[in-house]
Image: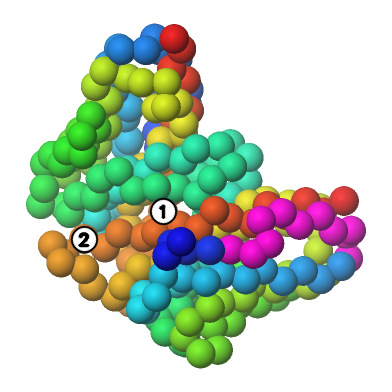
Amino acid sequence: DTGVSQDPRHKITKRGQNVTFRCDPISEHNRLYWYRQTLGQGPEFLTYFQNEAQLEKSRLLSDRFSAERPKGSFSTLEIQRTEQGDSAMYLCASRPTKTSGGANEQFFGPGTRLTVL
Amino acid sequence: KNQVEQSPQSLIILEGKNCTLQCNYTVSPFSNLRWYKQDTGRGPVSLTIMTFSENTKSNGRYTATLDADTKQSSLHITASQLSDSASYICVVSVPLGGSYIPTFGRGTSLIVHP
């Protein structure tokens, strides 16, 4: 499978614990995005990377959240001291910097569903 | 107020029927408008992408339209199938800093009954 992959697919943790998710984008895709999606809502932008550089961060990304993409390939999203409100689906997407035709399509992974007890 | 509003929130139709989903957005300028299909528990999959200068884009039984003057888009599904049951999400790329960031609507939940 050459699509975007995410690991784990499901994570159950206790409040106060730290969790880390991994995203492997499509090869050669320069841009990598993280989103959070709660039940009945559309995804909300968290942050994105151009290669290894983190270019934008949403105000939703509190200081308990940190994302890295050290070598410009896979990315990790860590949540420290998890809270029940962090329970959500965490989606990763990737795309090349530019595609033909001018409009850029993002390819999403299957997501990591986090449940904080 | 959400910058991307979708209607209806949910829709139930019979297999074989057509339907139209609406998306109204308030942001301007924007880079492009996209429609995604999201099956339960899965990541969104792109259906159509339109730049602000395009009026319509088709992908099989899916046809999206865009009216940049009224800031409205629609997604028309023809001859619905059971597999069309999913959430359909409208996405507008909004300027943030030096980039365009996707802003998602809440989606329309479509259920197709046999």
Percent position of residue B87, x then y? 46, 34
Q: Furthest-front residue in view?
A: A1
Three-letter amino acid code at disc 1? Thr
> B99 or B63: nearer the eye?
B63
Q: Position of residue A97 (x, y in %)?
A: 29, 75
**Above or below, A99 relative to B64:** below
Q: Which mark is residue A103?
A: 2
**Quick check: B43 left or right of B90?**
right
- Considering the numbered disc 2 on the image, is that residue within a helix, a strand or a loop? loop
Magenta highlight on residue A56:
no
Residue B39: x and y in percent read 50, 38
**Which quadrant: the C terminus of chain B?**
top left
Give, as a three-letter code, the residue at label 2: Ala
Q: Nearer the viewer, residue B13 or B66?
A: B13
* Residue A35 appears in the picture as rendered: no
Task: Give the labeled residue for mark 1.
Answer: B103
The span shown in magenta is A6-16
B48 over A16 or under it: above or below: above
